[in-house]
Image (cartoon, rainbow, N blue to C red):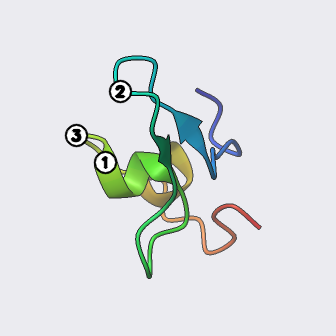
């Protein structure tokens, strides 16, 4: 994933649920992933903007 990419929504193919970021998170990777999204990992203040 590029360091300037974020995903605001993700449709789970297993349960057909539309995931959205939790309050305070910039994307679904930060909310539900094992690691924060690349922009957060490189300390980018413009995450997902």
Distance between mark 3 and mark 2 Cα atoms: 19 Å
Label 1 belongs to which residue?
Answer: 32
Task: Evaluate whether residue 37 shows in this view.
Answer: no
Counting residues from the N terminus, which is met first, the one under dot 3 or under dot 2?
A: 2
What separation in Å lies between label 1 and label 3 (alpha carbons)?
A: 7 Å
| Residue at the left extreme of this rendering | 34
Name the residue at the right extreme. 49
The tag earlier along the polypeptide, 2 or 1, is: 2
Q: Is residue 49 left or right of residue 1?
A: right
Residue that label 2 marks = 15
Q: Nearer the viewer, mark 1 or mark 3?
A: 1
What residue is shown with label 3? 34
SS for dot 2: loop
Mark identifier at residue 6? none
Q: Is mark 1 on a helix, strand or loop?
A: helix
Q: Residue at x 65, y 31 (%)?
A: 2
Question: Against 40, is 32 above or below?
Answer: above
Residue 49 figure quarter: bottom right
Q: Look at 64% across and 46% down and name the residue there.
A: 6
> Which quadrant holds the N terminus?
top right
Q: Which of 38 and 8 is in front in this view?
A: 8
In the foreground, 17 or 40: 17
- Labels 2, 1: front one: 2
Separation of disc 2 and disc 1 at Cα? 15 Å
């Amino acid at each position: 994933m590029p360091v300037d990419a974020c995903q605001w929504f993700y449709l789970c193919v297993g349960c057909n649920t539309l995931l959205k970021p939790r309050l305070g998170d910039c994307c679904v990777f930060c909310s539900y992933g094992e690691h924060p999204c690349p922009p957060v990992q490189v300390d980018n203040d413009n995450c997902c903007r």
